[in-house]
Amino acid sequence: MLAVGDDLAILAGSGLKRLNSDGKVMWTALWDKVDSWQDGRIVRLRGGDLVATRFGPISDSGVHVMRVTALDGAKRWQSYCQPLEVSHSKYRHRAEITSDLGKLKLTSRGSAGTFIEWLDPQTGKQVRRTREK
């Protein structure tokens, strides 16, 4: 959940929603693929756009990332950061996204290790990816 003026942006199962102070849905931005992933984050970029992440907290799921305009929920782009390849799943997958040196920095920690992926904030395209053991 993230405050957007007097409203709230929240992650819902099917996407990102903006609710006004009366609880009315002002807009909804849907994920391209709906799945059972239950965790994610929302961050605000300089200029006001929102970036949301979606991932499975009990599997090395990879991470969906979506950028929308805060005013009307228009989807600017959506991308997917591939997980590390594993033959099993374990608990405690976490992912966080920050803005770092003009790029979006996604850090994903799962049972197979950690990957860091830098995305171009304008296009959502991967700029660089590294793996930590």
Image (cartoon, helix red, strand yellow):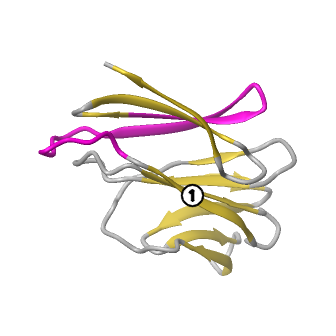
Relative placement, left or right, of 3 versus 111 is right
Q: Is residue 102 magenta?
A: yes
Q: Position of residue 59 (x, y in %)?
A: 23, 48
Residue furthest to the left:
88
Q: Position of residue 42 (x, y in %)?
A: 59, 50
Quarter location, residue 4: bottom right
Relative placement, left or right, of 115 versus 100 is left
Residue at left offset 43%, top offset 39%: 95
Residue underneath mark 1: 79
Residue at left offset 52%, top offset 71%: 31
Which amino acid type is shown beneath numbered disc 1? Ser
Q: How many circles with numbers are drawn on the protein? A: 1
**Nearer to us in this view, 14 or 115:** 115
Residue at left offset 41%, top offset 48%: 82
Q: Is residue 129 magenta?
A: no
Residue at left offset 78%, top offset 32%: 102
Q: Could you tell me which quadrant the N terminus lies in?
A: bottom right
Question: Mark 1, residues whose alpha carbon is within 10 Å: few (<14), some, or many (≥20)?
Answer: some
Residue 37 appears in the figure: yes
Q: Residues in magenta?
A: 83-108
Q: Position of residue 98 (x, y in %)?
A: 62, 34
